[in-house]
Image (tube, helix red, strand yellow):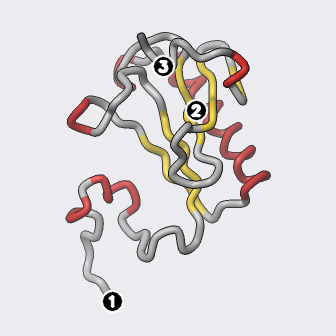
Amino acid sequence: MCVFCELNKEDYIFENETCFAKYDNYPVSPGHILIIPKRHFPSFFTATIKECSDILKLINICQEHITQIYNPDGFNLGINVGKTAGQTIMHLHIHLIPRYVGDIEDPRGGVRGVIPDKRIYYAQK
């Protein structure tokens, strides 16, 4: 059974017609939120136009919420599609990860860091 399909509405912090948002159980940083479609399917690439629209709406609502409560300095958005990309729960979910000055020594490259040797791709000064 899918852990996201088994969640209770009490776990939701925001919700719209096709999606909901919840705090990540294993946050990368304070305020880390997941945006999850209600329909069970694994890949962003099979989401309907309505689901994509609702995902984007919740991302914006969650970003405002995180900003008001945690005042981060930036954000990363992340979607893992498939085991090779690191997906461990085969139900689409989008990570909205607040970033803070000093949370890592050199944040350049951002999401490129999923392959550490490829994160820094330009000449360092």
Asked which secondary structure carries label 1, the reply is loop
User: Do callouts 3 and 1 mark residues in contact (Cβ within 8 Å)?
Assistant: no
Q: Give whichever of discs 3 and 1 has the lower sequence position.
A: 3
Asked which secondary structure carries label 2, the reply is helix
Vertical order, 14 against 116 (above or below): above
Q: Quadrant of residue 80?
A: top left
Q: Which residue does the image show at 66% across and 13% down from the upper left?
A: 17
Tell me: 45 left or right of 15: left
Tell me: 51 left or right of 23: left
Q: Give whichever of discs 1 and 2 has the lower sequence position.
A: 2
Is residue 22 or residue 62 the one in the foreground? 22
Q: Position of residue 120 (x, y in %)?
A: 28, 70
Q: Amino acid at mark 1?
A: Lys
Tell me the mark number nearer the camera, choosing from 3 and 1: 3
Q: From the image, tell me which residue sits under label 3.
A: 3
Vertical order, 69 against 45 (above or below): below
Q: From the image, tell me which residue sits under label 1.
A: 125
